[in-house]
Amino acid sequence: MSHPPRRRAARLLVLLIAASLLAACGGGENTPAPGAASGSAAPANTEPVKLTVALFSDFHYGPLYEEFKKTHPNVEITERRAQFNDHHNNLVTQVATGAGAADIVAVEGGFIATFREVADKFHNLNDYGLNSRQSEYLDWKWQLGLSKDGSQLIGLGTDVGGLAMCYRPDLFKEAGLPTNRDEVSALWPTWEQYVETGKKFVAAGGKAAFTDGPGEHFRAMVEQAPVGFYDTSDKVVVGSNPDVRKAWDVAVSMIQNKLSGKLTAFTPEWTTGIAKGTFATMVCPAWKTGVIKDQKPGEGTWDIAAVPGGGGNQGGTHLLAPKQGKHPKEAAELINFLTSKESQLSLWKDASALPSLPALYTDPAVADFVNPYFGDAPIGKIFTDAAKALKPQYTGPKSGDVNVAMGNGLGRIELQGQDPEEAWKQAVADSEKIK
């Protein structure tokens, strides 16, 4: 489950400085003897325990909390939610100041590298036996939950964002385009062909935009590349990476050909557009199908096709336990439960959150899952195929900030009329200033 990154470079700088100065700022700790944490294990005591879980959207955890409390009747769980950028910005401040963090926090994939840099501000889940889960996970997903030196486990993965493209068959029909998902997929094996399809859609003269906006497409294209915004030495390589420039040029062509609805994902206007059909396509990682369904556009209103450029991943989340929490043992047990095989399978069925556990990809409940809300789309096959095709990309410490800088550049072209080449130069310069 995920959302697009927002600007927070200055606050992240504060985080990295403060993390080295606030070694004594960990909040109260209740550290039991190490042992395996389990969602089904009985609690060690019956003293009341209050846990707060901080999320950036509806993760559909409600029923799982109730299941967890059957074996942990002394645990009271409170959930708090904030908008995506506010959630991560708040966590930056909370970690830097040593106050205000929840017992369990969700961190989106574009930001996990930032918090790996300050792993000492989070409980080491190895101390509670969760290192036993390693063999269950996609290797790259597990590695993202480790401290930079690999000595600490700071988070367990919830889902991954196998990529597809969601589209409106009714709007495609109005534009004289195919509506069958296999035929739609065949329209755009490449991103350039996706743009060409968009031109035909626009030429048909309908009121809807072809797509929501260029930012998510740009991010998807970059994340499909072997190298993204950083090289493995943590150097920003935006200006020298031809794949980033190619993604930029394709995104600019979407703007210049008037394919975009000029919408930013997860704004009220965007969610209204999902329900009312103000745009016809959008980049669609697995978790976003749950977002679509939550807007109640109507069964069969949206369908799912392959994403241009082959497989890929966008987003996905880890659950971490800040050291400010007073109940690390119970927090670790809840993290373990929420990421268990049974819970990930449940969340796949309820919210289309594609599991991080590859053994589930051959489980008929995942691999053969057909979603009637999306025209009986075989989303199990679509998203597991995308996940299997993924070649993990190295994520630098502030990839989210760099993506924001580049997205701001696209915004200046689309909303302010800035010359594309000038916007590129400015976006690259802004990216290279991010430390």
Image: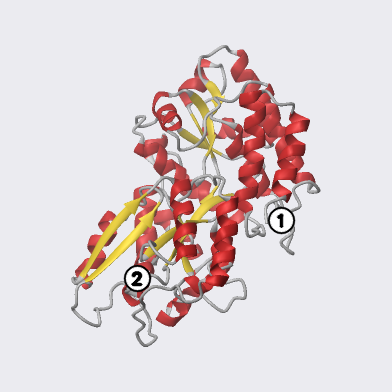
Residue 198 placed where, x, y %?
Answer: 62, 24
Label 2: state its secondary structure: helix
State the residue lying farthest toward the top: 205
Q: Position of residue 377 (x, y in %)?
A: 45, 39
Image quadrant of residue 219? Answer: top right
Relative image position of residue 65 (x, y in whole percent): 27, 61
Q: Quadrant of the C terminus?
A: bottom right
- Tell me, yes or no, if residue 4 can be seen here: yes
Outermost residue, bottom direction? 33
Picture quadrant where residue 177 is located: top right
Residue at label 1? 230
* Residue 179 in the image: above or below residue 284: above
Q: Which mark is residue 433?
A: none
Q: Residue at x 78, y 48 (%)?
A: 241
Disc 2 crowd rating (10 Å Cα; few below 14, some 14-19, many 20+) is: many
Q: Position of residue 196 (x, y in %)?
A: 68, 25
Q: Is residue 146 visible?
A: no
Residue placed most toward the observer, 256 or 357: 256
Distance from label 2 to label 1 (Cα)? 33 Å
Q: Is residue 253 above or below residue 44?
A: above
For disc 1, the neighbor class at 10 Å (few under 14, some 14 to 19, many from 20) is: many
